[in-house]
Image (tube, rainbow, N blue to C red):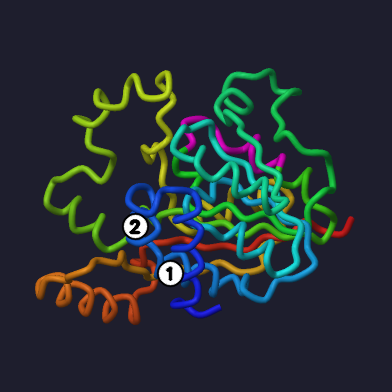
């Protein structure tokens, strides 16, 4: 699927969901990044698999994967923002579940910390730019990804790179790289206080690799990606900044904006 095909398909889904003038803006701003991430993981060619997508939000990738001939399930946090997609998932035979991951993995007893799926169920789990939103220890979540994957199944994971170039520049200037603290109060009462938008913990690539390697996954690949947001009009200063970023990334990939890994559950 080309980037143009991806956008046209997403535009039509947004129209059907009634979000073309609202939340579809998220996709329009991030479409190149999403397309490049899917291309990196070679997802446009996946067929005949049982797939779980965790936190796809308005990427529309579950619909593409379903159209390609896969059995797809979606797990989202209980955020009203994703509700408009429910009818579309149902119409296309995509099972959609809401789950409070903090309740499941942050406060539940250890023996009950599970995803709402049976063991050895999926060939592929996709979890893009979601783990940075966890305000709990992610070890239980990673262990349960291992449980729900079939032997030989894979998970494709991305998180923002804490050591990206922009963050290093901010720190050198004495600025925070976290969510603006002034925004905390704005979202304190949103969805009963369960706002999922903050990045509570970002990672560097070696940390992400260690987390999965320590929980009995084999690491298939681990890379940094450099992607940019889409804007209708790009100022000259931003064009220069992107040119410089590409040059630095070609020499020092560890300054890319995303950490991307493919991990595999061993056959035995």
Going from N to C along the chain, the mark reached first, 2 or 1, is 2
**2 and 1 marks in contact (CB < 8 Å):** no
Numbered tag placed on residue 225 in the rendering: 1
Residue located at (61% from left, 57% from top): 62
Left or right of 186 on screen, residue 130: right
Residue located at (45% from left, 68% from top): 224
| Residue 79, horizontal then vertical, whole percent | 48, 33
Mark 2 or mark 1, whichever is nearer to me: 1
Residue located at (13% from left, 46% from top): 174
Mark 1 residue element: strand
Q: Residue furthest right?
A: 268
| Residue 154, horizontal then vertical, whole percent | 72, 60
Considering only vertical position in the picture, is 222 above or below 21? below
| Residue 169, horizontal then vertical, whole percent | 19, 58
Residue that carries the numbered disc 2 in the rendered image: 163
Chain part drawn in magenta: 134-144
Left or right of 69 on screen, residue 84: left
Residue located at (60% from left, 49% from top): 88
Q: Does the magenta portion include 101?
A: no
- Give neighbour class at mark 1: few <14, some 14-19, many 20+ (Cα, 10 Å): many
Left or right of 71 on screen, residue 257: left
Between residues 161 and 54, which one lies in front from this camera angle? 54
């Amino acid at each position: 699927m080309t980037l143009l095909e991806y956008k046209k398909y997403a535009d039509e889904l947004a129209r059907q969901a009634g979000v073309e003038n609202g939340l579809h803006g998220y996709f329009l701003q991030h479409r190149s990044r999403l397309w490049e991430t899917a291309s990196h993981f070679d997802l446009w060619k996946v067929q005949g698999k049982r797939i779980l997508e965790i936190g796809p939000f308005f990427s529309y990738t579950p619909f593409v994967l379903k159209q390609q001939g896969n059995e797809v399930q979606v797990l989202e946090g209980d955020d009203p923002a994703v509700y408009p997609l429910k009818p579309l998932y149902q119409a296309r035979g995509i099972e959609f579940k809401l789950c409070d991951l903090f309740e499941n993995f942050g406060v539940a007893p250890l023996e009950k910390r599970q995803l709402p799926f049976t063991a050895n169920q999926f060939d592929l789990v996709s979890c893009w730019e979601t783990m940075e939103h966890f305000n709990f220890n992610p070890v239980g979540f990673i262990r349960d990804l291992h449980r729900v994957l079939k032997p030989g199944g894979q998970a494709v994971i991305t998180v923002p790179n804490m050591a990206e170039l922009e963050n290093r520049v901010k720190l050198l200037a004495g600025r925070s790289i976290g969510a603006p603290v002034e925004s905390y109060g704005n979202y304190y009462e949103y969805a009963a206080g369960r706002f999922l938008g903050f990045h509570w913990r970002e990672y560097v690539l070696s940390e992400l690799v260690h987390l999965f390697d320590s929980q009995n996954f084999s690491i298939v690949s681990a890379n940094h990606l450099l992607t940019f947001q889409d804007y209708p009009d790009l100022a000259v200063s931003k064009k220069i900044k992107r040119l410089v970023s590409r040059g630095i990334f070609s020499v020092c990939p560890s300054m890319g904006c995303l950490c991307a890994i493919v991990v595999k559950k061993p056959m035995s």
